[in-house]
Amino acid sequence: MLIKDFYAIENHTTESDGSHVYTVKLNQNHDVYKGHFPQKPITPGVCTIQMIKECVEDAQSKHLTFTAIDRCRLTAMVTPSGSPVLNIKVVSDAADPTKVSATIFYGETTYMTLSGTVAEK
């Protein structure tokens, strides 16, 4: 679980459409950045997927795992210095809550979109 020191949830709101929006702050001093391009650190894609998974777990109040990722698009680099605060919007399908989609964004920049299937651990 990354939440303990890779990032922190600063805010969580539930929208009228049932989606959840999390505001998270990256820990710029985390060890992962020392090994992932230390001169110009970027957040590994697997870490952004893990943050999404943890937000989906929080939104659904369950321990989950991704059983499928149908679509995952990295559209901008997440850097701890340039984008230390992010919003993660999580949407669960009302008819089938195992189907989820998420967007990582801040302001006008979208960093990642993802859709997939989760199952309870």
Image: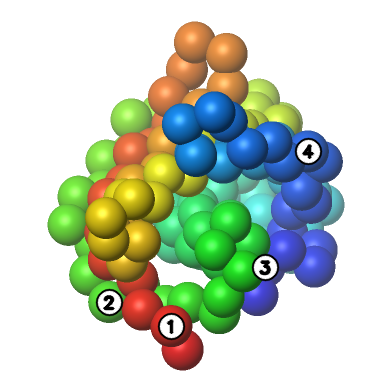
Q: CA distance from mark 2 to mark 3?
A: 19 Å
On the rendered structure, is 110 left or right of 116?
Answer: right
Q: Earlier in the sequence, mark 1 or mark 2?
A: 2
Q: Which residue is at 78% across, 38% downward?
A: 11
Q: CA distance from mark 4 to mark 3?
A: 17 Å
Task: Bin the neighbour count of mark 3 within 10 Å (Cα to Cα): few under 14, some 14-19, many 20 and up.
Answer: few
Residue identified by numbered label 4:
11
Q: Earlier in the sequence, mark 2 or mark 4?
A: 4
| Residue highlighted by disc 1 | 120
Amino acid carrying label 2: it is: Thr
Q: Quadrant of the N terminus?
A: bottom right
CA separation, marks 1 and 4? 25 Å
Q: Which mark is residue 67?
A: 2
Q: CA distance from mark 1 to mark 3?
A: 18 Å
Quarter assignment of residue 28? top right
Question: Foreground: 93 or 55?
Answer: 93
Q: Quadrant of residue 103?
A: top left
